[in-house]
Image (tube, rainbow, N blue to C red):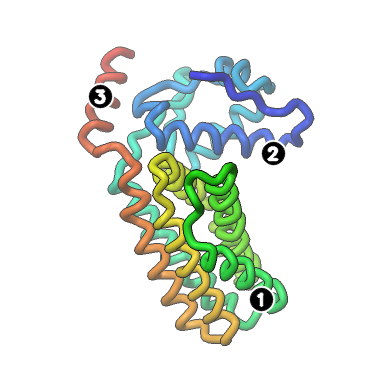
């Protein structure tokens, strides 16, 4: 596995975030398998950091249910299956729909208009030309930025600190699912889902601009439901994950 090193001048919180995002991606891509141990000392050498951000990152991963922490054994990767994705998306739908309803009327309108313009520009462009240098990468990066901006804006504007904090706690997990699914599509030059999400985002934004919280929440629910099967298809089959986890435990 190639070494991924953090930049030495990154702030402490940014180092931890980079570590968490990297490990999540590897788990969801199957490069770190269920039952595999994550050893603090090895990870610290690999990322070029002290043990502290590694431990904090593993605690964060345990908090969102991706690893188990055991005394004297460190962190063990948990099985993450298509069923887990569906259940996580169910929780996400409940939280984000509530946030969307609450944010309606509170949200910054100029920022919403700017967001709508960005989404429209991307959806009008449609899918990138596969043989245009840099075009697919730019398209995906723009879509990622707009997706994050929309969901962050809604959470920050919902007027409920506890709800906003819970969405913030889980957003790294949500975005890791998103990025792995998009990488899956990008590797196949398939940008249909990414463009489709742009239309779903626009429906949410336009409802918020109209001051229609009910329609905005309905559009958010539809957006999250339609993404479940795309996220799920990038996850290993449940039985394969469980078998691998049992094999790893027998070795230990």
**Mark 2 lies on residue:** 14
Q: What is the secondary structure assignment of the residue under circle 1?
A: helix
Q: What is the secondary structure assignment of the residue under circle 3?
A: helix
Whether residue 65 can be seen here? no
Mark 1 vs 2, N-terminal side: 2
As measured in the structure, the alpha-carbon distance from the residue carrying label 2 to the one carrying label 3 is 34 Å
Name the one closer to the observer, 165 or 8: 8
Q: Residues within 10 Å of mark 3 (few under 14, many from 20)?
A: few
Whether residue 129 can be seen here? yes
Q: Residues within 10 Å of mark 2 (few under 14, many from 20)?
A: some
**Mark 3 lies on residue:** 246
Instruction: Please name the residue shown 59% across and 49% down the image.
Output: 138
As measured in the structure, the alpha-carbon distance from the residue carrying label 3 to the one carrying label 1 is 51 Å
Residue 197 image-quadrant placement: bottom left
Mark 3 vs 1, N-terminal side: 1
| Residue 113, numbered label | 1
Q: How many callouts does the rendering have?
A: 3
Q: What is the secondary structure assignment of the residue under circle 2?
A: helix
As measured in the structure, the alpha-carbon distance from the residue carrying label 1 to the one carrying label 2 is 30 Å
Instruction: Please name the residue shown 43% across and 21% down the image.
Output: 37
Percent coordinates x, y for residue 26 in the rendering: 46, 31
Farthest-out residue, front: 131
Name the one closer to the observer, 107 or 227: 227
Name the one closer to the observer, 252 or 204: 204
Percent coordinates x, y for residue 30 in the rendering: 37, 31
Residues marked 1 and 2 touching at CB (< 8 Å): no
> Which of the two marks, 3 or 1, is nearer to us in this view?
1
Q: Is residue 114 left or right of residue 140?
A: right
Above or below for 70 versus 59: above
Give the quarter of the figure containing the C terminus. Answer: top left
Instruction: Please name the residue shown 42% across and 76% down the image.
Output: 218
């Amino acid at each position: 596995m190639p070494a991924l090193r953090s930049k030495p001048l990154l702030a402490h919180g940014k180092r931890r975030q980079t570590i968490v995002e990297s490990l999540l991606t590897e788990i969801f891509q199957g490069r770190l398998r269920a039952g595999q141990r994550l050893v603090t000392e090895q990870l610290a050498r690999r990322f070029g950091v002290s043990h502290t951000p590694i431990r904090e990152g593993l605690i964060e991963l345990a908090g969102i249910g991706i690893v188990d922490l055991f005394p004297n054994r460190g962190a063990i990767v948990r099985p993450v299956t298509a069923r887990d994705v569906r259940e996580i998306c169910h929780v996400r739908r409940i939280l984000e729909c509530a946030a969307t309803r609450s944010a309606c009327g509170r949200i910054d309108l100029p920022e919403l208009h700017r967001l709508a313009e960005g989404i429209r520009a991307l959806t009008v462009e449609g899918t990138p030309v596969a043989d245009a240098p840099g075009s697919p990468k730019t398209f995906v990066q723009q879509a990622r930025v707009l997706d994050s901006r929309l969901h962050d804006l809604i959470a920050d504007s919902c007027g409920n600190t506890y709800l906003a904090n819970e969405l913030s706690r889980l957003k790294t997990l949500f975005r890791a699912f998103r990025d792995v699914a998009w990488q899956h599509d990008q590797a196949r030059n398939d940008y249909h889902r990414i463009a489709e999400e742009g239309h779903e985002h626009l429906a949410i934004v336009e409802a918020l601009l109209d001051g229609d919280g009910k329609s905005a929440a309905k559009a958010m629910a539809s957006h999250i439901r339609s993404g479940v099967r795309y996220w799920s298809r990038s996850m290993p089959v449940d039985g394969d994950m469980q078998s691998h986890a049992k094999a790893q435990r027998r070795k230990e």
